[in-house]
Image (cartoon, helix red, strand yellow):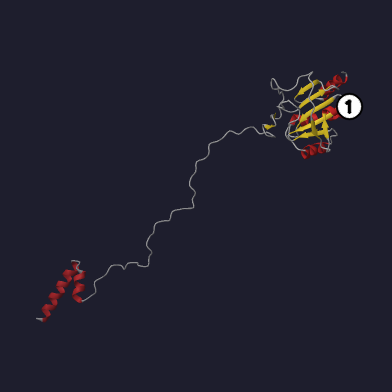
Amino acid sequence: MHIKKIVAFIVIAMVLVFAGCDSFIGDLFGAPEPTGMPEDTDRPEDTDRPEDTDRPEDTETPEATEVAAATEAPDVTESAGHTLGPKNTDAPEMIEGTGYDIGDVIYDFSVPTIDGGTFTLSENLGQPVFINLFATWCGPCVAEMPEIEELYSEMGNDVVFIVIDIGEDAATTQAFAESNGYTLPFGYSVTGDVLPDYYIEFIPQTFVLSADGTIVEYFAGSSDYDSFITAVEAAMGQ
């Protein structure tokens, strides 16, 4: 009887094995029930990726602006009612209704000179007077200066010369004269207010006066030695 029970038990066990009832056998023999994979408690929880706060916000590209043509000096300088216009003007024109004409007499004026003195027109009449208005940054002014220097070296005993730097100080004018080896008398006007009742629109300008201060010749823009000496000789003949 005992043997029959054992055989019956074996048969039941085999049936259960083939039926996939492993857990039933485990329970029957007291085997522990398999458990699931333990949770990984040490694994840090996923956190949201921090925002990239250092990344600069996209900005709009500024619209392109037109660039003015490069110049060596400011376009316009206004001072005491006189205007110094753009340099390098090859064919300037005087403003209608202002300035002097040939045959007019220039009013008396004074400017400081780089040697520490003062040039006053009325004190230098009795001889023809050569007046040149320039600036060290002005290309045509610089280009014609050797022509004026040559004229001065030849006629400086018979004609009064004054070259006036418009809108610059004594140090700038003196540095220009010394660096180029010029012996011309140089004056300067920081404000550009030089000739009374005269609107200085551009440079260079040159006035050639007779001994009594009358304008014999006027050069609007740069000129050359031949033109200058012709004007001076005409002034000396009056």
What's the residue at 17%, 69% (across, down)?
A: 16
Extreme residue in the bottom direction: 2
What's the residue at 87%, 26% (across, down)?
A: 159
Against 17, is 99 above or below? above
The amino acid marked with disc number 1 is Met
Against 49, is 59 above or below? above
Element on which disc 1 rests: helix
Residue 138, percent across and down?
Answer: 74, 32
Q: Residues within 10 Å of mark 1 (few under 14, many from 20)?
A: some
Task: Please give the count of numbered marks on the rendered protein.
Answer: 1
Against 25, is 59 above or below? above
Can the viewer see residue 230?
yes
Extreme residue in the left direction: 1
Residue 236, percent across and down?
Answer: 87, 21
What's the residue at 21%, 73% (across, down)?
A: 26
Nearer the observer, 127 or 88? 127
Residue 63, percent across and down?
Answer: 53, 36
Q: Quadrant of the C terminus?
A: top right
Residue 124, percent across and down?
Answer: 86, 28
In-image side of 57 versus 26 (left or right): right
Can the viewer see residue 147?
no
In-image side of 58 versus 40 (left or right): right
Rendered image quadrant of residue 85: top right
Residue under label 1: 155
Rendered image quadrant of residue 168: top right
Q: Quadrant of the N terminus?
A: bottom left
Nearer the observer, 49 or 73? 73
What's the residue at 79%, 39% (across, down)?
A: 175
